[in-house]
Amino acid sequence: MRLKKVLGVFIFLILTLGILVSADIFSINSGGGLGIFLSPGANIEGFFSASTIDVSSCGALSDTGAVYTLTQNVSSTGTCFTVAAQNVTLNCQGHSINYSTTTVGYGLVNNGYHFVTLENCEFNLGNFGLANSYGVYVYGGALNNTIDNIKVTTTSISTAENKNNYGIYFNNVQKSIIKDSNISALSSGYTGYSNYGISLSSGSNNTLTNNVILTNNYLGHGIYVNSNQNNISGNLIHTLFTNSDGLMISGNSNYFYNNSIITDQDDAGGDSSFGIYIYSGTNNVFRNNNVITYKSPSYISKGGYASDIDTSNLAEGKPVWYNDSLSNYIFQNVNFSNYGQVVCAGCNNVTYENVTVINDGLLFGGTTNSFIKNSNITSNTSHGVYLFYSNGNLINNSYISETKDYVNALKIRYSNNNNIENSRIYEATNEYAIYMQGASYTLFYNNIIDSYGSNYGVLLYGATDYENFTKNTFNTITSCMILDSQSSTQSYFQQNDFNCGGGYSLYAYRGSNTYLSTNDDFNGNKILFGYASSAHIFNVTNASNFGGGYFSTATSNKLYVNWYLDAYVNNTFGVSLFEANVSSWNSNLNLIFSDLTESDGWINRQLLREYFQNYTNKYYEGNYTLNTTKFGYFDDSRNLNMTRSRIEYVTLEGTPPIISIISPNATEYGTLSVDFNISVIDDENISACLYSLDFDSNVTMNRLNDSYFWDSPNLGPGPHDLTYYCNDTSNNWGTNSTNFSIANSAAISILLSENLTIGVKWNVISLPVDDLDAMGNNLNASTSYLINISAINTLVDLYMKSDGDLVNDWSDVIGLGNETYTFNSSDSTLIGSNKTTMTTNYSLIGSSMGDNSVVFLKFYLDAPSSQAAGVYTNNLSIKAVRAGQAP
């Protein structure tokens, strides 16, 4: 009955006075009746009471439906006000609340109560050293809360640690409003950081409008949105320190419009306070937001999250060109100068070719396999090109620069496998031309890297690993590069030209990396090792004009200076030697390498150390010994002083073939039949073996194989000197000599063929005749005129002459000058043999012939037409003598 009366009164008020009631409490049902919806634990009687309670001290707000009015400034050692009922209002009337002067607490805390209103209050964190002490903390599923016209200041100092002293913290809050309020989350830079202005964590459907938010601490974001379907509009957000984003977004389907965001880092090195940072979350919509950043990109995203950002949004006062999840597209010959920033978020295979970009530059966020080619990108408010969580991209033949202090021409963060080639990276202000953080496997090839401000050319920072700098030219007025990669990996420098002004080529700062420098030109610059706890290893190989290492403090860093050794081996005839062994030992007799030459005579390139240097000393290796050996050659040994890279040309003198004489032995033989036989040993193939008998011309021997050679010479009696010669394919000659004799007792006999015993006959029938064959010539067949020789212990010379002119049976005469003959000791046809005119003097027809030798003869006759016909005969005298004797 009481509930009906209350409802009746309330309905009457609605109908007669037009009172507006939240739809979360009342609704009209389908039958036209009025429905009431209460949250769990709600007190319907208290809801309709509207008592006003004055408060002058901190405490619990426990009367449902009450309006609490603060009558004076209050203070609390911990939490000041705790909401303990539904539908309460705290109106501070402009008074201040100084909370958490001693312990962790909150200005006001609300755990799950609905329809709570907080207005006209000023909250101040009392103890600057506390953490997790929020100005206003609402959580536990609370809904329909309203925060209106309050001021919150949280200030944190002391140690450098997360303080998390948020101005307002909504955690799992829904359908609530924060409006017309002023939030300041302050600290002293890096001491007491991570103080957000407003943090929305989980929950949904909240509204933040017309608030002014200021932060000046490290990681002090203006508004952090990690919840869904919120409306955030008309806010003025200003952050003043490094890594403090205006809006940091991780939630989904939020609507951001008409917000003004300024990130203005007041620290010299800060450059990562983004205007709007889409860390994660999808389907967020942005309209008419105005972002101004003084050192950072206005808009940035880790990837493609289906963000809807049109050109109504401004970056540095100009429209932003924002592409999300764009694929397979080419921007060619586009001038983006009228845009405040160009962003490609979550893109794939997008090409920017021959484009012009200024203002906040060009940003790849979560972009892959994309290209920047032949472009001019010059930022005057942020980084020129920013690769952020972007992998596998190529920058080629482009000019990238910036003109503002403390930002970089090229910045690469958390991005891998990118290539920067044939480009100029130009930095004219007080920052690094290239800044790399958490990036790996980046190739810088054939770039010009200029830094004419007061900082280094390149910074490798924070787990930046496996970088490759090849054929780049560095031009700086300080040091060229600082290596501050705090990990244990390798990076490579090859064929770079370091022109580092008055600084160092490389400054090995924090970390324990291995760096490999090969063929770099240091132009007199040194490597600086200057951080006490670092443990870098630097291998410098084949450097030009290297100034050495400088250890400014006691460290565990190590510097190794190495040089190349190339070696070529040939023989004295200039022939490259295959599989010659080349080995080297250091001054401590430790084997450094042992290698075999290839077919071209070269060994594999070797690396030899000149010295090792640490903080305490420099340790030289001293002279190296280089030995070269090959079977069949004399060894080569030499000393090397490795103060530069060297090419050693080694010529080995070959060892000759080894000749063993099988025969003849050094003895006297009783026969002329003495064979010449030798065996040969060599590591190569034998080209030929020869001999010289009695200092006469060389005779080539017969080859059985590469190890055995022979010949059967014609010998005469008496003493003989014999020298053998063999050469191999490298033209190394081996020799061996002997002497022997043949007993000086001999017997000679000759046997004439029958046709010779009766004289040589011609049957002259018709005249004249020219080269008429004798009757035993048998024309072109084998001759019937031959002489067989038998000889014991001697060689034979054979002579022949005519007894006179040719005569027939009728005493007709043909002059001897008309007769010619040929002779041969191997061809019985005598075809092609030279003709000799017959005389009455002995002529040699066989020289130095041995036993069983044969001489073949043919005879020819010329006769004029006046000559009488008939059978003409010529009688011959044939004589055999010992070789060398007269007949």
Image (spheres, helix red, strand yellow):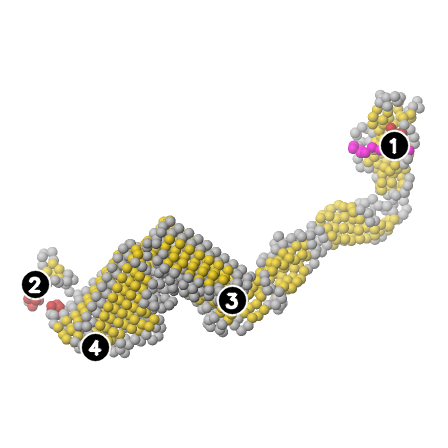
Within 10 Å of the Cα at label 1, are there few (<14), some (14-19), or many (20+) other Cα atoms? many
CA distance separating discs 1 and 2: 167 Å
Label 2 or label 4, whichever comes before in sequence order: 2
Label 4 or label 3, whichever comes before in sequence order: 4
Most foreground residue, 101 or 360: 360
* Residue 206 appears in the rendering: no
The three-letter code of the residue at mark 2 reads Leu
Q: Main secondary structure of the magenta part?
A: loop
* Residue 550 appears in the rendering: yes
Residue marked by disc 3: 526
Image location of residue 718, percent across then percent down: 88, 49
CA distance separating discs 3 and 1: 99 Å
Residue marked by disc 2: 17
CA distance separating discs 4 and 3: 63 Å
Q: Secondary structure at mark 2?
A: helix
Q: Secondary structure at mark 4?
A: strand
Confirm or deny contact between disc 3 and disc 1 (CB under 8 A).
no
Which quarter of the image is occupied by the C terminus?
Answer: top right
Residue marked by disc 4: 74
Q: Secondary structure at mark 1?
A: loop
Asked whether, in this view, residue 309 is left or right of residue 553, the answer is left
**Rendered residue at 23%/61% (across/down):** 234
**Rendered residue at 58%/57% (across/down):** 604
Asked whether, in this view, residue 150 is left or right of residue 414, the answer is left
CA distance separating discs 2 and 3: 87 Å
Residue 321 numbered mark, or none: none
Give the residues drawn in magenta, as a range. 830-840
Within 10 Å of the Cα at label 4, are there few (<14), some (14-19), or many (20+) other Cα atoms? some
Label 1 or label 2, whichever comes before in sequence order: 2
Residue marked by disc 1: 838
Most foreground residue, 412 or 24: 412
